[in-house]
């Protein structure tokens, strides 16, 4: 009897324990179920939040790149342009930093990355290599445009026209105003012994050898390089003049004569006649009496402004360039002559003229005379016409 009770008791306990365990399992299942349900509810919001954040990051990056690509100054009227020199071997990083320092791009880092990985923004370029040289870059250009200019080698050229009959100093001013080279550097380079010896010029300066023409210079060139270009052009054109094709040079006295003819003639066909007048005067020991030489003394030697008129006092200036005082050519050229004057000095007309005077101011033509009396009459007639 006792044993049975004991078994019953154990059995009851076992059932109780069994019942006790079930609720635990049930609670566990309920707990897990609730957690899973909560995760399911939270998961969509988490994904949407991450997606929104990612969109914001991409958008922010896009606008940052777009801003850094854009021109520093969109207004072309307000934008500053600079000549940028890219030396051979300069790294992309250094170029980028230089452009940013000059205020021509917004981000050197983005510039560098774009050059290194051009397919991102420049689909037409598989690789980019910058060419050395001088480039004109404006703040109104966007970064991609600047990269293309440097990659394509579109260098800046300064179209510079040098008129006939200018002196070295007047040419220097034109070059300086056009930012080709510095005024003082050019003047000094024209007296550089190395340049003079290179071209076989037996004179103190290159005056007369700086050929007037239209040039395409680089910005901020070295002055000796500019001088050499102009002298080389002189000798190239000299060889095209009749009788000079086989010549390597020019008689210095003829160059001086050409520089005076250049300042006197206005109509091309009269240049050989004017050259003949001066040669005829020299042949009899008569002074050339060229007002152009007086102007040279006043403006180039004395450093004064160009005179409106030449006075009798000016004609008495004591200078070897004064052709009213001395019956010979001045010691050097008074201008840089062009092809017409050079040809006239090398191939003068054969005449018996000793005088010429302007008789048609509109056309710029002269009347040539053999005697002083005829010359005075032509001058008087012209003055009478002007008065009437």
Image (cartoon, rainbow, N blue to C red):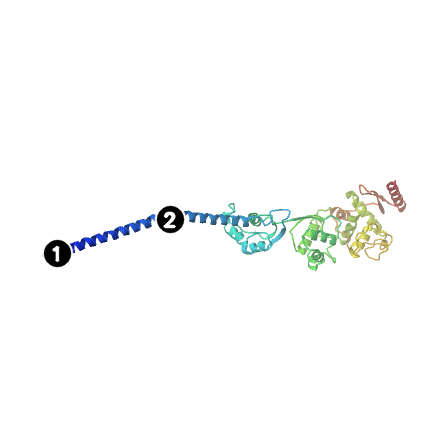
**In the structure shown, which secondary structural element does the residue marked by tag 1 occupy?**
helix
Q: Residue furthest left?
A: 1
Q: Secondary structure at mark 2?
A: helix
Q: Is residue 225 visible?
A: yes
Q: Quadrant of residue 362?
A: top right
The answer to whether the residue labelled 2 contacts the one labelled 1, judged by CB atoms less than 8 Å apart, is: no
Q: Which mark is residue 112?
A: none
As drawn, the label of residue 5 is 1
Mark 2 or mark 1: whose residue is earlier in sequence: 1
Q: Nearer the viewer, residue 362 or 376?
A: 362
**Residue behind mark 2:** 42
Quarter of the image for the C terminus: give it.
top right
Q: Which image quadrant: the N terminus?
A: bottom left
- Residue 271, image x and y in percent? 79, 45
In the rendered image, residue 245, in percent from the top left (x then y), is placed at 70, 48
Measured from the top left, where is residue 128 in percent x and y? Answer: 53, 50
- Left or right: where does residue 262 sit relative to residue 104? right
Residue at horizontal 30%, vertical 49%? Answer: 33
- Label 1 Cα crowd, 10 Å radius (few <14 / some 14-19 / many 20+): few
Q: Residues within 10 Å of mark 2 (few under 14, many from 20)?
A: few
Q: Position of residue 98 (x, y in %)?
A: 58, 55
Left or right position of 76 against 167: left
């Amino acid at each position: 009897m006792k044993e049975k009770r004991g078994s019953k008791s154990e059995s009851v306990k076992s059932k109780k324990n069994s019942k006790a365990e079930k609720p635990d399992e049930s609670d566990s299942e309920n707990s897990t179920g609730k957690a899973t349900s909560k995760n399911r509810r939270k998961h969509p919001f988490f994904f949407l939040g991450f997606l929104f954040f990612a969109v914001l990051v991409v958008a922010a990056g896009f606008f940052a790149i777009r801003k850094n690509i854009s021109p520093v100054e969109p207004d072309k009227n307000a934008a500053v342009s600079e000549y940028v020199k890219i030396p051979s071997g300069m790294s992309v990083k250094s170029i980028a930093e230089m452009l940013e320092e000059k205020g021509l791009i917004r981000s050197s880092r983005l510039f560098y990355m774009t050059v290194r990985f051009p397919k991102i923004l420049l689909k037409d370029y598989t690789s980019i290599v910058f060419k050395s040289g001088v480039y004109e870059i404006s703040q109104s250009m966007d970064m991609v445009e600047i990269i293309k200019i440097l990659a394509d080698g579109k260098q800046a050229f300064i179209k510079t026209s040098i008129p006939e009959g200018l002196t070295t100093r007047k040419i220097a001013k034109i070059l300086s105003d056009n930012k080709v080279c510095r005024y003082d550097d050019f003047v000094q380079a024209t007296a550089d012994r190395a340049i003079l010896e290179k071209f076989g010029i037996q004179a103190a300066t290159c005056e007369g050898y700086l050929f007037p023409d239209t040039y395409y210079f680089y910005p901020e060139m070295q002055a000796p390089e500019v001088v050499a270009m102009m002298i080389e052009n002189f000798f190239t054109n000299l060889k095209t003049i009749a009788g000079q094709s086989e010549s390597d040079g020019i008689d210095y006295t003829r160059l001086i004569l050409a520089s005076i003819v250049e300042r006197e003639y206005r109509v091309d066909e009269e240049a050989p006649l004017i050259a003949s007048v001066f040669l005829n005067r020299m042949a009899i020991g008569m002074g050339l009496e060229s007002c152009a030489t007086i102007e040279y003394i006043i403006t180039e030697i004395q450093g004064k402004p160009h005179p409106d008129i030449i006075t009798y006092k000016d004609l008495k200036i004591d200078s070897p360039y004064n052709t009213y005082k001395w019956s010979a050519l001045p010691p050097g050229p008074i201008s840089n002559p062009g092809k017409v004057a050079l040809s006239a000095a090398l191939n003068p007309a054969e005449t018996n003229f000793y005088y010429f005077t302007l008789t048609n101011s509109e056309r710029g033509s002269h009347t040539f005379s053999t005697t002083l009396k005829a010359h005075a009459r032509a001058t008087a007639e012209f003055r009478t016409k002007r008065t009437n």
